[in-house]
Amino acid sequence: MAPAGPRSGDAIFANVERVNAELFTLTYGATVRQLLTDLEEVEEVNKQLDQMGYNIGIRLIDEFLAKSNVARCVDFKETAEMIAKVGFKMFLGVTATVTNWDANDTCCSIMLEDNPLVDFVELPDTCQGLYYCNILSGVIRGALEMVSMKTEVTWLRDVLRGDDAYEMQVKLLKQVPEEYPYKDDE
Amino acid sequence: MIVCVAVVGHQNNPLYIQSFTEEDDALKLHHIVHCSLDVVDERVNNPKKSGPTLNETFLGLLYPTENYKVYGYLTNTKVKFILVTTDLDVRDADVRNFFRRFHAAYVDAVSNPFHVPGKKITSKTFAERVSTIVKSFGLSSAG
């Protein structure tokens, strides 16, 4: 019983509006640079990028659900696949792979083969602690939080820091049951 | 063999200069590059009347010295690329091809958000790419 909905984001990617990849890359680069100038501390920039990603993620999930027509995911495993195969394809035009599941199926790695954010980028020696793509982990965290999954997303490997791939670890902390916070008298 | 390449900014400030010789003659090569800037200025201020000079970035042979030939290339943003070679018969097409690839490498290097325009190019990737281009230049002219 295969769930309905697309198995890859290619069809959606072909239909959504797109911007020039270099414009996108350079805009993101300019943003990161400006943050570095404004906040001065690399750690602060990492936090800010994550926060920006979170803010994007909590909005982006609605667009994702509206345009992708995916069915409800039965477990976290399927959710991760959905992010990697449909989500990344739809918004970044690349596909990711999901690996390294732990025994409880609550923690996995999303590997990016290609990362359009980092074209041209070379980290200078002064910014070695910077997680340049920290916005992506924020997006995933924000988006999953909106569909009642508390997650923690951390970068394990980053080509800009001398590793051989981009790897994000997504750890499911808890699944928040859907609740209705509205009280009748408010 | 290419002995030196240089990128010079629009205010004639050096952005990148690299020599590829075993001997310690960097100073001499830098001097040659420096001198060639005057020739570039001269070419720009007195463009040839004939031929399509508009948007032509390749300046051709700037001047031959006893041991070297100096070629120049001027981008539309007034950034100059200088090539010093010891080969005495170099095909124009090879040099054009070299500059085209060099220009592409330069464009990618300045697209790095951490590069400050008008400052020296410190990128290691750029340096590696340039030395690859320089090496392959020797091969293509030999073969």
Image: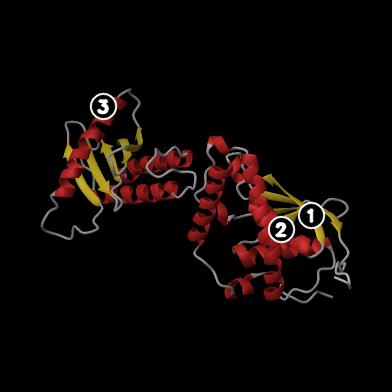
Do discs 1 and 2 share a chain? yes
Q: Which residue is mark 2?
A: A140
Q: What separation in Å lies between label 3 and label 2 (alpha carbons)?
A: 56 Å
Q: Left or right: A181 with respect to A123?
A: right
Tag 2: residue type?
Answer: Ile
Q: Provide the chain ID for the residue under circle 3.
A: B
| The C terminus of chain A, quarter of image | bottom right
Do discs 3 and 2 share a chain? no
Question: Where on the picture, by quarter, is residue A149?
Answer: bottom right
Question: Where on the picture, by quarter, is residue B61?
Answer: top left
| The N terminus of chain A, quarter of image | bottom right
Q: What separation in Å lies between label 1 and label 2 (alpha carbons)?
A: 8 Å
Earlier along the polypeptide chain: callout 1 or callout 2? 2
Q: Residue at x 59, y 76 (%)?
A: A15
Q: Which residue is mark 1?
A: A151
Q: Which residue is mark 3?
A: B28
Q: Left or right: B105 with respect to B37?
A: right
